[in-house]
Amino acid sequence: MPRDQQSRVSRRKVLAQLFTGAGAALLAGCEAASRTQWFPKILGVGEHLTRGAQHLLTSRRSMAQEFEEADLSPQFRSNGTSNPKSPAYQAHARNGFADWALQVDGLVASPATLTLAQLRAMPSRTQITRHDCVEGWSAIGKWTGVPLSEVLARVKPSDSAHYVVFHCADQMSSGDLYYESIDMEDAYHPQTILAYGLNDAVLPIANGAPLRLRVERQLGYKMAKYVMRIELVGSFAHVGRGKGGYWEDRGYEWFAGI
Ligand SMILES: Nc1nc2c(c(=O)[nH]1)N[C@H]1C(S)=C(S)[C@@H](COP(=O)(O)O)O[C@H]1N2
Ligand SMILES: [Mo]
């Protein structure tokens, strides 16, 4: 069974157990709250639930913590690829990505090609968040970009679209291009943005120029840099080696929640 199905099954089990116990009332309230708004992580509900169950109930809809300017790391380090080598990417970089365009396709009603200027003209969101890398470092940065939900509204995903796949420009040592994927719940989360700015400046190449994903409640490797193409799919069985991401294909968890 694919890992995402496994976790869905175990989640269902936990929810079923909750409904049979005193948790049912709390859960009902929680679900009502989640229908009406994106609610903050610290709620006070679930005081009587185990930590794990509370995490399951709140984390997918909660907002990641946002910080103040004073909290910004002096510099936001680069990790993984810091400058894609392909001639096509290098040519785009040389002219400031003026001719670059994001391709959005797959299971959508209206595939689109969006230039950097078009993406910048769309509604934007700025957020100061902490990035956590599995390698054991964190940094706080100020990201500006277009909410992924805005881009999805343009292309109109079909009902059969269950995941958003990000195809990147950089080739890894294995020869495969970096890729990542998230589900529709994360795709529509208000803090999920395609960032073109870092710390009030144009996104540096070292951090993923011209466009990189921020999906703030997950670990660093989910945040695809150098995004060239976004593909809506029903499953990622036929993308990469089938586990939903470059590092997932090498044993990392697909859902890398913090
Ligand atoms: N295309 C691409 N995206 C990537 C990577 C990469 O090597 N290539 N590394 C990932 C990892 S492990 C981390 S921690 C972050 C690092 O982002 P940064 O370079 O802005 O610090 O990017 C992620 N996204
Ligand atoms: Mo990372």
Image: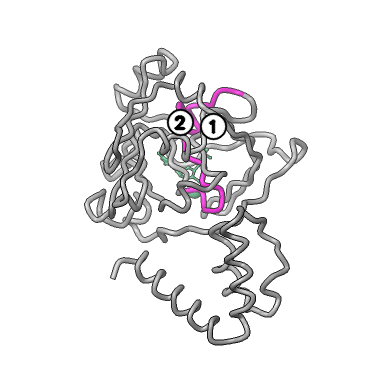
Label 2, residues with CA under 10 Å away: few <14, some 14-19, many ≥20: many
Using the image, tell me which numbered label, if any, was put on residue 99: none
**Residue 52, horizontal then vertical, whole percent:** 58, 74
Q: Tell which residue pokes out farthest to the left in this image.
A: 238
Q: Say which quadrant the C terminus sits in.
A: bottom right
- What residue range appears in magenta? 201-221
Residue hosting label 1: 145
**Residue 164, horizontal then vertical, whole percent:** 37, 46
Mark toward the viewer: 2 or 1: 1
Residue at 31% over, 57% down? 243
Label 1, residues with CA under 10 Å away: few <14, some 14-19, many ≥20: many
Q: Of helix, strand and loop, which one carries label 1?
A: strand
Residue at 57% over, 74% down? 53
Q: Please, is residue 118 above or below residue 234 in the view?
A: above
- Which residue type carries mark 2? Leu
Residue 4's image quarter?
A: bottom left
Residue hosting label 2: 211
Q: Are marks 2 and 1 in contact (CB under 8 Å)?
A: yes
Q: Please, is residue 249 above or below residue 129 in the view?
A: below
**Residue 247, horizontal then vertical, whole percent:** 37, 52
Q: Nearer the viewer, residue 203 or 148?
A: 148
Residue at 57% over, 54% down? 136
Whichever of callouts 2 and 1 sits on the residue coming sooner in the sequence is 1
On the picture, is 146 further left or further right than 240?
right
**Residue 238, horizontal then vertical, whole percent:** 22, 51
Q: Tell which residue pokes out farthest to the right in this image.
A: 70
- Which residue type carries mark 1? Gly
Residue at 45% over, 21% down? 118
Q: Nearer the viewer, residue 117 or 38?
A: 38
From mark 2 to mark 1, how far is it between C-alphas?
Answer: 8 Å
